[in-house]
C-alpha cells in the first residue's frame, strides 16, 4: 500500500485533464520530441494492450503495426512530454481481460477487436 | 557555508517518481521533516564544545520520564521524545534561540543544493565476508571443504597479529551516509522534502540530513565528468 503522503505529493505532478483510457481502446498519443533547440510533435496511433502502475508512474502500452512490423511503446501518461492522448475508438464492452498480450500473436483481420460504437467523445488533453 | 554542520531530522516516507522541467522522470525519496526544535545550546564554557541540541517526535507526558518532562517544561518546550546534538560553530550557535524551530531552506540551502543523508540501512544482522565485503566464494563441489569461509587472515610469527581493519564477517547494519544527494523540491506546506535518489533505511526510518561536506570538490568532479562527456 502506498503512503498517503506520497499520493499527496504526486497530486501536483498529475494531469487533471487526461481522457479515461481503457485497455482495448484505440488511441493516438502525441509525443513531444526535442531535437536540440527545435521541438516537434510525433503521433503514435495504436491499441492499448495494458495499463500499468499508479500515480505518476502510470503507463500505457500501445501497439501498432508499422509497415508489417509490430511496434510497441510504453508511455508515462502523466509525463509533460506527452502532449495529448486522444481516444479514437473504445473496445471496452467486449473485453474481459486486463492485459491484451494475446494480440501480439494475432495478425491481419484477427488482430482487431470488435469496437463498440459509443458516444464517448474524444477528449483532448493539453500538457500542464 | 555558514551552518556547515547543522542538520535536520526527518523521516523517510518512501520513494516515487516525479517529473522535472524537461519532462524527465526523476526518482525521488519523499522525506517528512519532524519538529526540529532547538532544545538546548551547548557552550564552550559549560560543555567544552559548541553544539545545538535538536528535539523531535512529540509524545504524551506519560511516555517520558519525570526528569525529561522537567527539562522540557523548564525550557517551555513541547514534549519531545528524542534529542540529538549537532556540533556547530559559535556564530551559528548565537543565531539560534532555545525553542526556535529550524528553517529547512536556511539549513540545507535552496532547491538543487547538495546534501548528505545519514540513516540506518535495512538490517542484515551478522553476515559473512561475501555479503559484507563483496568477496568471492570458493567452489562448492570437486571435494572442497571450504566454501564461504574466510581464508588466511595474516602471516605467522611476523607480525604475529591480525592487522586492524581486516575484512571479516560481522554485524552489517551500521549507520550509512550517502553523500551528494540533491534536494529536488521543498513542499513547505506539507513539511516534505523531495530528495533525488535512494536513501538508506526502511520506510519510516529516522534520518539526519546535512548540507554536503565536500561541496566544492564534488562540483569540480561533476564539471570534469561533464567535460569528458562533451569531448
Image (tube, coloured by chain):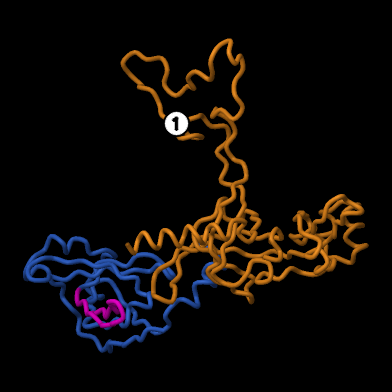
Given residues A107 and B171, the one toward you in this image is: B171
- Where does the image place residue A28, in percent across and percent down from the top left? 23, 80
Region rendered in magenta: A28-46
Q: Is residue A43 magenta?
A: yes
x and y percentages locating residue B127 in the rendered image:
53, 32
Residue A102, position as x, y percentages in the image? 18, 61
Residue at label 1?
Answer: B135
Numbered disc total: 1
Q: Mark 1 belongs to which subunit?
A: B
Front position in the image: B9 or A123:
B9
Chain identity for the colour orange used in the image = B
Q: Reply above or below: B30 against B44.
A: below
Q: Name the quadrant containing residue A78.
A: bottom left
Q: Secondary structure at mark 1?
A: loop
Q: Where's residue A81, x and y in %?
A: 34, 77
Image quadrant of residue B188? Answer: bottom right
Instruction: Judge left or right: residue B207 versus residue B218.
Output: right
Amino acid at each position: 500500500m502506498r503512503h498517503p503522503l506520497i499520493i499527496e505529493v504526486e497530486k501536483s505532478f498529475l494531469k487533471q485533464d487526461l481522457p479515461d483510457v481503457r485497455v482495448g481502446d484505440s488511441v493516438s498519443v502525441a509525443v513531444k520530441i526535442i531535437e536540440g533547440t527545435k521541438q516537434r510533435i510525433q503521433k503514435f496511433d495504436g491499441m492499448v494492450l495494458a495499463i500499468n502502475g499508479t500515480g505518476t508512474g502510470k503507463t500505457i502500452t500501445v501497439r501498432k503495426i508499422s509497415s508489417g512490423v509490430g511496434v510497441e511503446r510504453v508511455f508515462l501518461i502523466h509525463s509533460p512530454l506527452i502532449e495529448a492522448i486522444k481516444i479514437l475508438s473504445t473496445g471496452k464492452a467486449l473485453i474481459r481481460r486486463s492485459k491484451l498480450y494475446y494480440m501480439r500473436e494475432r495478425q491481419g483481420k484477427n488482430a482487431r477487436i470488435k469496437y463498440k460504437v459509443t458516444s464517448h467523445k474524444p477528449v483532448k488533453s493539453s500538457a500542464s | 557555508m555558514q551552518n556547515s554542520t547543522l542538520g535536520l531530522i526527518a523521516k523517510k516516507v518512501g520513494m516515487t517518481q516525479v517529473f522535472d522541467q524537461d519532462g524527465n522522470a526523476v526518482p525521488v525519496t519523499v522525506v517528512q521533516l519532524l519538529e526540529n526544535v532547538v532544545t538546548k545550546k551547548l557552550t564552550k564554557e559549560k560543555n567544552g564544545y559548541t553544539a545545538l541540541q535538536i528535539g523531535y517526535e512529540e509524545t504524551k507526558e506519560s511516555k517520558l520520564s519525570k526528569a525529561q518532562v522537567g527539562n522540557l517544561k523548564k525550557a517551555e518546550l513541547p514534549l519531545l521524545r528524542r534529542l540529538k546534538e549537532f556540533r556547530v560553530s559559535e556564530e551559528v550557535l548565537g543565531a539560534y534561540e532555545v525553542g526556535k524551530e529550524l528553517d529547512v531552506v536556511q539549513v540545507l540551502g535552496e532547491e538543487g543544493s547538495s546534501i548528505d543523508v545519514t540513516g540506518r540501512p535495512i538490517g542484515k544482522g551478522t553476515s559473512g565476508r561475501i555479503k559484507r565485503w563483496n568477496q568471492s566464494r570458493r567452489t562448492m563441489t570437486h571435494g572442497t571443504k571450504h566454501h564461504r569461509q574466510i581464508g588466511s587472515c595474516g602471516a605467522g610469527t611476523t607480525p604475529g597479529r591480525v592487522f586492524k581493519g581486516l575484512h571479516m564477517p560481522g554485524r552489517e547494519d551500521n549507520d550509512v551516509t550517502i553523500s551528494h544527494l540533491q534536494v529536488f523540491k521543498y513542499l513547505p506546506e506539507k513539511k516534505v522534502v523531495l530528495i533525488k535518489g535512494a536513501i538508506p533505511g526502511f520506510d519510516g526510518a529516522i534520518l539526519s540530513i546535512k548540507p554536503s561536506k565536500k561541496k566544492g570538490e564534488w562540483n569540480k568532479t561533476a564539471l570534469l565528468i561533464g567535460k569528458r562527456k562533451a569531448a
